[in-house]
Amino acid sequence: MGNKSIDEMSDNYPQEHWAPRNCFLEPIPEMLAASELLSKAVDLVLAENFALAAKLIEQADIPELEKHNSKIAGSRSEEIHRYRPIEGAPEIIKCKKRMPSYKVELSIYERDGWHCRFCETRVISKDVRKKLNRVFPVEARWGNKNVEKHRGLSILESSLDHLVPHNRGGDNSESNLVTACGPCQFGRGGWTIEEVGINDPFDRLPIIDSWDGLRRLLAK
């Protein structure tokens, strides 16, 4: 996308296209549908109805999720990513990627109510995804390549996002960490939120409701 100014890029898009937004793309209905199916599947596992749980997990492997993810986490585009140069933005540096402890990671997810702080979609605990894969290796498929992964579990898996990326000098302080779904996590790459016109998620309250990241499964 280069380092063109917004004025130059506005030749292709109206000025309002570059207005700040909360996320790259609004979550699609299939994201909620997948979370509902997986939640019901977890309840069935807890009730030891494994056959029906397997069917629901399979239904949550929705093709539209892959298409949505590829728009955001795939090739970069002015239409979706809307990169713009920011004066005084931190320089790209060489650094070793470092992540916080599991305890800190879990505390961030709990602080954020197991919802993506950008698009606000529900996210699912990575520990739950791993357990579902152990119990249902076929239905909750998980391989090394994206095409080998269950779409619902992959897109909705909880991840930590650094508001200021590591390669721009960001640290692991709680004020720099937020919960993100797969597309919102991998769509930004090494850009700052200012460079892609994303609002600071700390400017709005997290969604705290009954959603538990499906961690109730881990109590069994």
Image: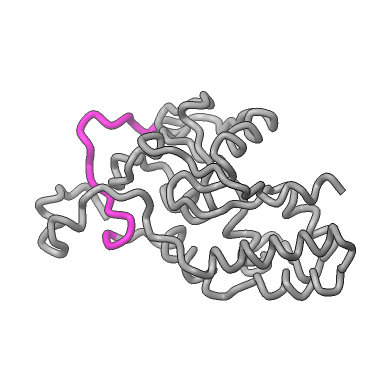
Quarter residue 152 falls in: bottom right
From the viewer's perspective, tell me whether residue 21 is left or right of residue 133.
left
| Front one among 192 and 23 | 23
Q: Is residue 80 magenta?
A: yes
Q: Residue at x 68, y 48 (%)?
A: 125
| Front one among 92 and 67 | 67
Residue farthest front in this picture: 210
Q: Residue at x 81, y 46 (%)?
A: 218
Q: Residue at x 81, y 74 (%)?
A: 52
From the viewer's perspective, tell me whether residue 133 is left or right of residue 3.
right
Q: Which residues are magenta?
A: 78-92
Residue 62 percent location from the top left of the image: 60, 73
Vertical arrangement, residue 165 with respect to residue 198, above or below: above
| Front one among 80 and 110 | 110
Residue 21 percent location from the top left of the image: 30, 50
Vertical arrangement, residue 176 with respect to residue 24, above or below: above
Q: Is residue 174 magenta?
A: no
Dominant SS of magenta comes to loop
Residue 140 percent location from the top left of the image: 75, 65
Q: Residue at x 46, y 29 (%)?
A: 176
Vertical arrangement, residue 97 with respect to residue 142, above or below: above
